[in-house]
């Protein structure tokens, strides 16, 4: 739990910046829109997941949630870079599913720490918005 109190936003911002750059290169001339969507989705997702965890009885900090969600986006960054090397719909599906599962698996421990011990039965309710968040990025 001590690790959760030492949050930072520099790493997640760099990871998100890298993802926005990679997507911008792929898309073309809509750089501003891509950057706006990437960063706005991250902040809105962190807000929704923080509110959801609070409603389920947890006591999360907003920036703590944003930090962990940002660090767990790294597999999606790696998947976006891997798309440059091979092209094919089956390859992209397999890599996307692997990145999604990696992100969700990495965030399960965080969600467990957000909920109090007596409310751990609600873990799936807390994980649902996290899965939607990473699914939207994937």
Image: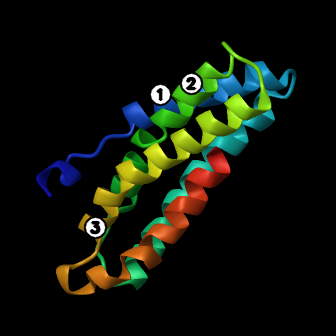
Q: Quadrant of the C terminus?
A: top right
**Which colour scheme appears in the figure?**
rainbow
Residue 87, given in percent of the width and then of the height, sits at 76, 20
Question: What residue do we see at 52% from left, 70% from top?
Answer: 128
Q: In the rendered structure, which disc, 2 or 3, sits on the residue that comes first in sequence?
A: 2
Residue named by callout 1: 14
Badge 2 marks a residue whose secondary structure is helix
Instruction: Describe residue 9's horizontal placement relative to residue 81 as left or right.
Output: left
Task: Tell me, for residue 18, which label it has, or none.
Answer: 2
Image position of 93 with respect to 22: above or below: below
Q: In the rendered structure, which disc, 1 or 3, sits on the residue that comes first in sequence?
A: 1
Badge 3 marks a residue whose secondary structure is helix
Q: Contact, CB < 8 Å: mark 2 with mark 3?
A: no
User: In the rendered image, is residue 78 in sight?
Assistant: yes
Q: Residues within 10 Å of mark 2 (few under 14, many from 20)?
A: some
Residue 64, given in percent of the width and then of the height, sits at 33, 54
Residue named by callout 3: 112
């Amino acid at each position: 739990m001590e690790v959760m109190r030492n949050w930072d936003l520099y790493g997640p911002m760099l990871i998100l910046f890298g993802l926005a750059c990679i997507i911008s290169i792929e898309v073309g001339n809509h750089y501003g829109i891509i950057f706006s969507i990437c960063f706005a989705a991250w902040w809105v997702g962190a807000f929704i997941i923080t509110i959801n965890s609070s409603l389920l009885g947890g006591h999360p900090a907003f920036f703590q949630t944003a930090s962990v969600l940002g660090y767990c986006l790294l597999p999606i960054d790696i998947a976006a870079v891997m798309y440059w090397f091979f092209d094919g719909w089956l390859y992209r599906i397999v890599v996307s599913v692997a990145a999604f599962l990696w992100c969700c698996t990495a965030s399960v421990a965080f969600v467990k720490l957000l909920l109090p011990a007596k409310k751990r039965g609600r873990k799936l309710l807390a994980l649902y918005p996290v899965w939607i968040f990473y699914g939207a990025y994937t």
